[in-house]
Amino acid sequence: MAAVALVASTTGAAAQSDELRAVEGEWVGAISFIGVGLTGNTYETAGDFAFVSAGGSLEGTFQWSTVGTQIAGAVTGPDTRPRFELTSVISNGTPIPDVRGGGEVELLVATCERLEGTGRPDPGIPVSQDVEWWALRRDATGAADPGAFFDALGTLQAEVGLTIDDLESGRVILTAAFADLEAAIADAERIGAQLDRTEGCGLEFYRSLVAAQVRRLLDVLFADSDIPAHRVSLVLGMAVRAGLLGSGAEGGNPDLEAAARTLLEQRIADASDENDATGLTYLALIAEDLGYDDLAAQAQTAMEAG
């Protein structure tokens, strides 16, 4: 999974993507991803950037490098859609003339201390695939150098991502991976607790640092009808802890809520048909936690009837 990590200064509240913005302030950070060139070759990049958001526009610079290649450019565009524009490419010590191209970032999530989004590269240029963009308010870590925070975050996200890769490919089953995932959720909460959420936070929703990875875990759950009811309950509970489902979840997530509700409806029906009192107990509890009182009542009625 390609990733872009950025450090940002923002106090925006949760909203739909066309309302999200990098509010006025200084933004700094690190950028890294796995790229795919025009010839199909892959390469890993790492670099940094700095820009200022003022008057609805962005102005700054970025740079990254691969083996034998150094790339630099400008950060521009409106504060609702940051643009990374290439200005310089040096390959094996030789400047490449007439450099052009770049890409935009589509903002998807905003909390008071960070932004998340995805890269949208221009057509016809060497690009990275499935770019994920991550942003943090500059002083949110309470440290002059947020490098240690990003190192811990990157390691955690990579570990969770590899576990989900194994689940998606069938190399491991959920039962075997669950302990590692549970520990990762706890680690994300511990690391996230270091962030300063005081400035402009208000009553915003909570979103885990590994919410994007937990979202992939939900897809695994939705696709596997053989996962036992107690594991269904535990995975949905993870999604609640990650801020993806439930009353504290981010706004504008009706599709995910609908999928979770449909899953619970089917699993409650299955457990009822099988007279699985233990499974119904787990499903009733998670339905109640999610606020699906009617489904919790259905599970309770099925238990009493059994």
Image (cartoon, rainbow, N blue to C red):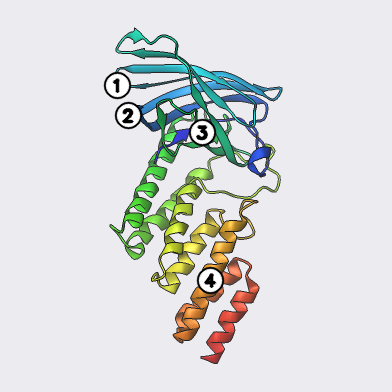
State if disc 3 and disc 1 touch (CB < 8 Å).
Answer: no
Side (left or right) of 16 relative to 145: right
Which tag is nearer the camera, tag 2 or tag 3? 3
Q: Which of marks 1 and 3 is nearer the N terminus?
A: 1
Q: Above or below — where is 229 with respect to 222? A: below
Q: Which residue is tagged 3? A: 120
Q: Label 4: few (<14), some or many (≥20) within 10 Å? A: many
Q: Label 2: few (<14), some or many (≥20) within 10 Å? A: some
Marks 3 and 4 sit apart, C-alpha to C-alpha, by 35 Å
Q: Which residue is tagged 2? A: 43
Q: Earlier in the sequence, mark 1 or mark 2?
A: 2
Residue at 60%, 50% (x, y): give it: 206
Marks 2 and 3 sit apart, C-alpha to C-alpha, by 18 Å
Marks 1 and 2 sit apart, C-alpha to C-alpha, by 8 Å
* Residue 247 in view here: yes
Residue at 48%, 68% (x, y): give it: 233
Q: Where is residue 133 in the image (x, y as percent from the top left)?
A: 50, 36
Which tag is nearer the camera, tag 1 or tag 3? 3
Q: Which of marks 4 and 1 is nearer the N terminus?
A: 1
